[in-house]
Amino acid sequence: MAGVLLLLLILFKHFVLSDRTQRMNRESSNLYFNFCQRDAEDVWLNVVPNHPLMHGTIYESKVVNRSSHNISNWKMVIKITKPVYLSNCWNGSIEIHQKTKGKTIVQPAVRLHDKEYDELKKLKVKKFCARKKPLLIYLNPGDKIIYYPDEEYSENIIPAYTGTDYHYTDIGFVFFKNDTEPMNMDFDFAKASLTYHMDDSISDNVMLYVFGVLFLMWLFIISSMIRLKIIKTAKLRDQEHDKQTIEQVMTVFTKFIDAKDIHTGGHSERVAMYSRMIAKISGRSEEFCQKVFYCGLLHDCGKISVGDTILSKTESLTEEELNIVRAHTHKGYELLKSLSSIPEACQTALYHHERFDGTGYPEHLSGKLIPEAARIVAIADSFDVMSTERYYRKGLPREKILEELKDNSGTQFDPEFVNAFLKLVEENRI
């Protein structure tokens, strides 16, 4: 966005604020200027004491304002392409850039036509001083002179076109040449350009309108992006709050379930944690890992319908009691099927006792037909059950548990997730 603003500022400066440049003899709807040799013959131009081949020419330039706006703050840059001598100019001042021995000497703007001959001889640029007038300033290819209009002669502002007359300013230069041939009628020893400021009104400047529209569009885009960012941040904050609330509710609910059996305290939370770790190391998405965590929390919620006497019984369960315990998968499904935001939860509650070889319950599903979340939770659930003490036995040693998982890989458990779990164990993360 900072780059877009910078581009707009550059365009504004270039099209609205910057000065304009016009080359000599180039047609333009705003301005026109040229150079031509003055028709009148001035005898003194051919009289340079002791230098019979030195002869000069007066060149006049007319700067015409063709636009409907005043032209101000203008200056003319004349770049020299052939050796000549500058003697005088009027009515403004002239700045001289002269290259000598690899260095550029700059003579600040001076009004040549107002200076006495003795004063002009003190100029710091390289010059030819005859015993008598005129003073001649050396100009070679690569040198340049800059003409600045004179406020005293009202040159600095060229009024706008009124509909009947074009306003203009006349300026003049005297150049000398040391040659047998007279100077060309054409201004062929230099290239000239004129830089100026046009006093546009805001209503007439099309580019200002364009810039204004672009700037408003930029502001609209920026404000829209800020608004979207605020909305997105608020939404993420609400989602995080909702997530924490859901987890808290689920955790409290699972504590009620686990409280039915003092030997299974914290079981659902541990299963949830292991399940998320298995999903993550298996390369599943963050969203899926979080859903698997919820599935682990709620997988045994159906046990709330199983009596305490059955859950805490130390002897072997009767067939009828086994059927009641196995029914907790259906009860869990019924409790969770309305949780539409996490459809995996009810599926996991129903299928976490299915076996990979199809011999589990309640529907004897096998392989990939068992929902992925249920296959993950089955491993986490079995590991925690074998690790903790129960009414009917003590917790098994870790080596024995890992051996059981390996032996039942491909029969009871999905081999992919068994390998993922074993990797977590190897990395000491479980």
Image (spheres, rainbow, N blue to C red):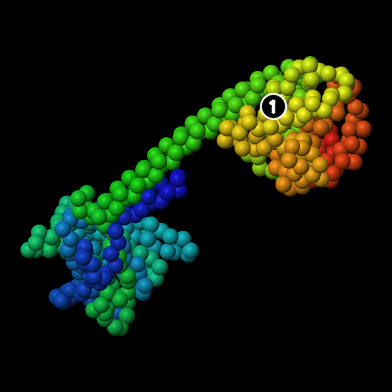
> Looking at this view, is 110 or 421 the one in front?
421
Q: Quadrant of the C terminus?
A: top right
> Looking at this view, is 281 or 20 the one in front?
281
Question: What residue lies at 42% left-to-right and 37% top-to-bottom?
Answer: 227
Relative vertical location of residue 77 with respect to residue 266 in this rendering, above or below: below
Query: Where residue 65 sits: x, y (%)?
Result: 18, 62
Q: Tell me how many marks there are.
A: 1
Q: Is residue 267 left or right of residue 17?
A: right
Q: Is residue 130 left or right of residue 225?
A: left
Q: Name the residue tied to disc 1.
A: 302
Query: Where residue 423 sits: x, y (%)?
Result: 83, 40
Question: What residue lies at 57% left-to-right and 32% top-to-bottom?
Answer: 338
Relative vertical location of residue 230 with respect to residue 321 in this rendering, above or below: below
Question: What residue lies at 38% left-to-right and 70% top-to-bottom?
Answer: 140
> Looking at this view, is 179 or 299 the one in front?
299
Is residue 109 among what the camera can see?
no
Residue 284 picture quarter: top right
Query: Where residue 103 sits: x, y (%)?
Result: 46, 60
Q: Quadrant of the N terminus?
A: top left
Disc 1 residue type? Gly
Relative vertical location of residue 119 with respect to residue 254 in this rendering, above or below: below
Question: What residue lies at 34% left-to-right and 60% top-to-bottom?
Answer: 96
Residue 407 picture quarter: top right
Is residue 188 among what the camera can see?
yes
The secondary element bearing badge 1 is classed as helix
Mark 1 burial class by Cα count in 10 Å: few <14, some 14-19, many 20+: many
Furthest-bottom residue in this view = 181
Relative vertical location of residue 93 with respect to residue 330 in this rendering, above or below: below
Q: Is residue 353 left or right of residue 188?
A: right
Query: Where residue 275 sits: x, y (%)?
Result: 74, 34
Furthest-left residue in this view = 164
Residue 254 picture quarter: top right
